[in-house]
Amino acid sequence: MITPEEIWETAGLPARRLAGLALNPAAPDDVLLRLLADGPPAARMVLCRDRALPDAVVDAVVRHPDRYTRSFLARSPHAEPAQRARLLDDPEWFVRAHLADAPRMPGGVRPRPLPDWAVVRMILTYDTESLGGNLCFQTSARLMESMRTHPEPKVRRMGVAWTGVPDEARDALLADPDDEVRDSVRRHLRHEDPAWVERELPDRPCHGRAHALMHCALSRGVVEGVLNAPVGEGDRWMIAGNPTLPADVVALLAADADPEVRERIAHRSDLGPDERRALAADTDPRVRLALSVHPALSEAERAAIDYEVPVGGIFGPVPQRLVPRDPAAVRRDALSGHPLLRRRAARDQSLPSDLVPRLAADDDLGVRVLLAQNHPEAPAELLLSAFLEYIGYERELLLTRPHFPTAGLSRHAGDEDPAVRALAARDPATAAETVDGLTRDPDPGVRAAGAGHPNLSQARLAELLDDAELAHRAAANPALEPAVMRRLVATLPLPADAAG
């Protein structure tokens, strides 16, 4: 089975040029339809996967005879969910499986949910293997909440698998009229039975043992076994975060010789006052830092701890909760004197609008960048300053934020940082000679950005269409003249029904 990477790697210059044309936002429908019908695989791939499409082109994709082409629309993050849902009854399992698997999104971004009716139909008609992927991430919160009471037993079973068994629904689900629903609930609840967990606990280090020690109900026998005869070096660390750990063992591990165990214990919400005081004065700075954000502490108690927030870090988009945090807790974190709590608030999309300017001017880089990466109301000036200051992992995702500015970016064309120089290509007012210079930059990313600027001269565009490196970028340039676009598609073989 050929992969998208192989499709691109095996594409020659003519195919890559046509692939760029397929991404050109100014390309008329007839050009896109010709590429879809007769273009090379690389052009059909990027056309269906990497851009939004007019309805007429979507109609043609759904009818296209090539399953790979249809599958690219099925997993496109740019297609409307209703457009993707048109493929849910596709005759090829290959296409249906890609529809059930969510589009690849930037970190922290959920795909737009498919229509509720489409998800229900998929649950009722698709095999279990297809449903075990990422369909749950394409399901609306409304449907997710109602699945446990849905009239179809298979939907109720999937609701248990996806959302668990909350206390308020437990009795009804255990009395469900469908045998398989009741069995599913009982299987799900086994992790709450300490006797079952002790009986099934693997006696060797493995994923199953780690999951049980960290998340399942622990019997006293299991706990004593970990304390006195651990199977693996990490056993004590694993149980330190288990919510069913007895209070006396929490107190015991708060004084454990291993600072990693004490650090994990410091995060527990059920820590007693004595343990909190001891950990606040711990000899290990990681433990003190972990304790300093404990929810039971007052701001004065936090300030009294000798903690230090590490410089730097990964400040990218964060997956948003299906159920928002308590607004009062978000506000309290945003107003805290502790940078880590303000970072927690900054990454929350539900942060109240009145607090956005406050955190946008925060003296902590992590707070500012996390706000820029995650909040829908992050101002344009913050997005730009965050990009200029933050050079860590997922920096480039700041450029995908809808309010990232364009005006005035041409002033960065001479910056020593290639990523900053490339910003000039986002400014519609960048002069033609500056754009020309960007296409000749020593950095390939800057050259690629310059090749797509609409102020690039037609003469330079013509040169780049024959450049092995930049042809696809030049062909995607919206300034490309329609006559040139049609001349490019004229190189394609005639359709079979027109060849004679």
Image (cartoon, rainbow, N blue to C red):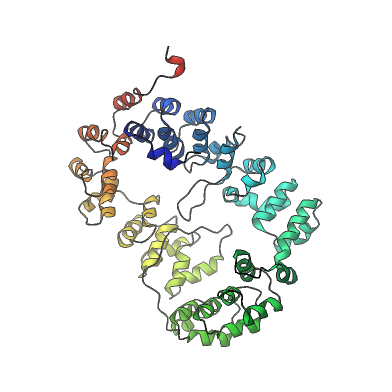
Question: Residue 158: image x %, image y %?
Answer: 68, 51
- Does 425 sit above or below residue 62? below
Please identify the quarter of the rendering in which residue 191 is found: bottom right
Left-right relation of 210 to 388: right
Q: Residue furthest left?
A: 433
Most foreground residue, 345 or 136: 136
Which residue is depicted at the point 37% across and 24% down? 492
User: Image point 63% across, 82% down: which residue?
Assistant: 228
The reply to whether residue 274 is in sight is yes
Residue 376 picture quarter: bottom left
Residue 10's quadrant in the figure? Answer: top left
Q: Is residue 440 left or right of residue 87?
A: left
Q: Position of residue 345 (x, y in %)?
A: 47, 66
The quadrant of the rendering that contains the C terminus is top left
**In the image, residue 55 above or below residue 400:** above
Picture layout, residue 73 above or below residue 349? above
The residue at the far front in this view is 204
- In the image: residue 472, left or right of residue 32: left
Can residue 169 be seen?
no
- For the point 42% across and 38% down, the residue is 7
Q: Is residue 267 above or below residue 41?
A: below
Give the x, y percent position of residue 354. 44, 63
Number of numbered discs overlaid on the protein picture: 0
User: Which residue occupies the foreground of this view, 405 or 291?
Assistant: 291
